[in-house]
Amino acid sequence: MTVRHVDTLLDGWPTLLWVLAEVRGDGGRGEPVWYQLPLGAASAHPAALADSAHVGRLGTPRGEAHLFDALADEELALEFCSLLAPDLNFSTVRAQPGEQSNTSLVLDERYIVKVFRRVQPGANPDVEITEALGRIGFGGVPVPLAVWRRNGTDFAVVRRFERSRGDGVELATASLREMFNRRRPPRDCKLDFAAESHRLGRDVASLHVALAEAFGAAPADGAAWAADMAAQLHRVADGHLDTDRIESVYRRLGTADDLGMAIRIHGDLHLGQVLRVARHWMVLDFEGEPARPVEERRRPSSPLRDVAGMTRSFHYAAGLALRETGLPDDELRLLADAWAERAVNTFLSGYAEVDEVHRLLPQARASRDALLSVFEMDKAVYEVAYELAHRPDLVDLPVRAVERLLDGEDELPAHDPDERR
């Protein structure tokens, strides 16, 4: 790691520092990856902080300084957030759990600050997309109130803190647990998820219509999509999957007809990225899949890529909840499959009810189904890489999904060059 820039945002003890660091893999020969580090420095060891917040010690002209994560310290976190949004007043701060590549802080239970830990030069897609959707009046995303931008690069964003009934994972898991406890079909359970998934389908379709309005739509480029998928496949799954067979599926996009339109999309849509507010689902976190290069995440793609992310998420939620029971007998497996199938079908039904979205999709039903399967494959490949890196004991879930998709793949209708003569 190489420190490229240091700013003193607050002098004295404790000191608030802002550090921009560069990390290169492959013994320093790899592409640079940039991280921002808000650091605190104190003359005494801040014992109240968790061990994970401590960074180390540093000699200074004023004596030895103890370095720590400034966002883990209430006083310095408030100071940092005040610099991001000087027009807003707040007095309390708490960290929101669950983030990995970013840090989110809730202020006065009214605002939420997302600090991008890993940064890319230029606009962050999460800021870029939600600002554009806000300009056209779309209400299904949290619109930025303030953005901390330095030299054209986004480092943090402030939004309103949305009150909700929970995110998609929480609500889906509650539904699955009730079904397993009662051992009844999902439609017979009080927390049946069908109405929620139907509403979610409508809201995702409305998002895609709004994205097409905000950023425009262009004819699909199947060859470019296939190239991006193949590059991702070899980045993350070489040695773990049958890459030759998977890539042969992707290559069919290059000769396929009836692929619909390409628009800006979410890029990493799943149940953890949606929040159930009073009257609808709110979609969060438009940064895209972290394993993909940011320029690839910004490229237009099919709306069905997002649809595939959500359909895979329903199956994932069911598989994880089944495993948590510790009693994966045949009856519970059948119930889990029934729950996932019901959630997928009601989601797709809700999505199809938004008339305007159909102009963005393949026109033939067979083409839609086949393209959706290809994007589900691409998503399952990403899941394999994610589980290998973070939860290797769960990697069998996406591996089985890849195998199932390979065995039951739908054919993409190929373009016949003589067809229009």
Image (tube, grey):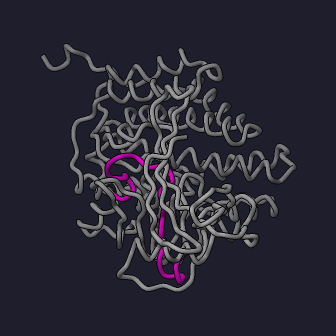
Q: Quadrant of residue 405?
A: top right
Question: Which quarter of the rendered picture does the N terminus lie within?
Answer: top right
Indicate whether residue 391 is drawn in magenta.
no
**Residue at position x 52%, y 56% in the image:** 37
Q: Position of residue 138 (x, y in %)?
A: 30, 67
**Start and end of the magenta stretch?**
106-127
**Residue at position x 23%, y 51% in the image:** 215
Along the line of sight, the residue nearer the viewer: 158 or 278: 158
Along the line of sight, the residue nearer the viewer: 121 or 321: 121
Q: Taking 89 as reference, is 27 above or below it? A: above
Q: Quadrant of residue 171?
A: bottom right
Indicate whether residue 122 is drawn in magenta.
yes
Farthest residue in the front direction?
A: 61
Q: Position of residue 108 (x, y in %)?
A: 53, 83
Along the line of sight, the residue nearer the viewer: 342 or 394: 394
**Residue at position x 67%, y 56% in the image:** 57
Farthest residue in the left direction?
A: 421
Question: Which quarter of the rendered picture does the C terminus lie within?
Answer: top left
**Residue at position x 39%, y 20% in the image:** 252
Q: Position of residue 384 (x, y in %)?
A: 63, 34
